[in-house]
Amino acid sequence: MTEKIQDLGTFDGIEGMERLRLEAEDLLLRSPKIVIAVAGLPGSGKTVFVKDFARFGFGRLGKRNLVVIDDNTLYSTPFWRLTWKKLNLRKESWQDFLASRDCRAVIFSNWVPSRFLDSADILVNLAVPEPRRLSRLRKREKRHPEKFEIQQKKTTLPVEPPFSVGRSMTIINDTRISFLWCLFWMLRRGLSL
């Protein structure tokens, strides 16, 4: 990373979601399209977090203005049920992929987003208390205890260079606050028509 990263801090729940929205809106004043990378240890809630954006939109951006990718799977939905398409993204082709998308924001989620992206405007690290993370992993991997053993040992978020990011923040993601926040903003957008 060659540029200075602006660390915005650690935020809990709604405060974190609102700060992320404000930062995204600030960046959209200067750029026609932004990239929000979402990282977190296995069990931190990345997939559920970004699927809420695919279903409801993000702040003032409706879901038609977003591209939501989780673990190289592109999610979209005309109503509630998500449709998905597997992608073969590579760091070398990321900029071409980004240019090909008609949207205002791309939200990309992965344990190691820097493995697939060369840059992001905002890096959001999702964090949860360790007992909660392990509980989620146990539930997810109950049929594959060997996977649980592997996933629970992951304790740091690696970065694979080259990767540049302008702003970074951490959101404590202990509850389904993203669902309520996204639903609130979807209703707010609908009422302002």
Image (cartoon, rainbow, N blue to C red):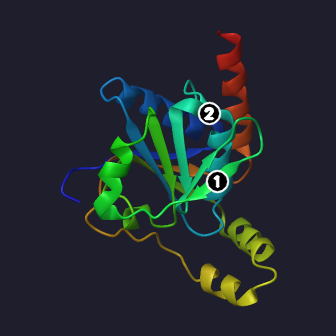
Judge from the rendering whether residue 126 lies leftward or rightward of residue 120; answer left or right: right
Quadrant showing the C terminus: top right
**Three-letter amino acid code of the residue under disc 2:** Gly
Residue tagged 1: 84
Quarter of the view holding residue 154: bottom right
Query: Between 42 and 93, which is closer to the camera in this rendering?
Result: 93
Q: Position of residue 50 (x, y in %)?
A: 61, 48
Q: Badge 2 local density, few (<14 within 10 Å), some, or many (20+)?
A: many
Residue that appears at 20% across and 51% down: 3
Residue tagged 2: 57
Mark 1 lies on a secondary structure that is strand
Q: Position of residue 144 (x, y in %)?
A: 75, 85
Outermost residue, bottom side: 146
Specify the label residue 124 is tagged with.
Answer: none
Q: Badge 1 local density, few (<14 within 10 Å), some, or many (20+)?
A: some
Say if 66 sits above or below 107 in the image.
Answer: above
- Measured Cα–Cα span from mark 2 to mark 1: 16 Å
Q: Earlier in the sequence, mark 2 or mark 1?
A: 2
Residue that appears at 70% across and 36% down: 78
Quarter of the view holding residue 121: top left
Mark 2 lies on a secondary structure that is loop
Residue that appears at 61% across and 52% down: 172
Q: Position of residue 140 (x, y in %)?
A: 76, 72
Outermost residue, left side: 2
**Three-letter amino acid code of the residue under disc 1:** Trp
Can residue 58 be seen here? The reply is no
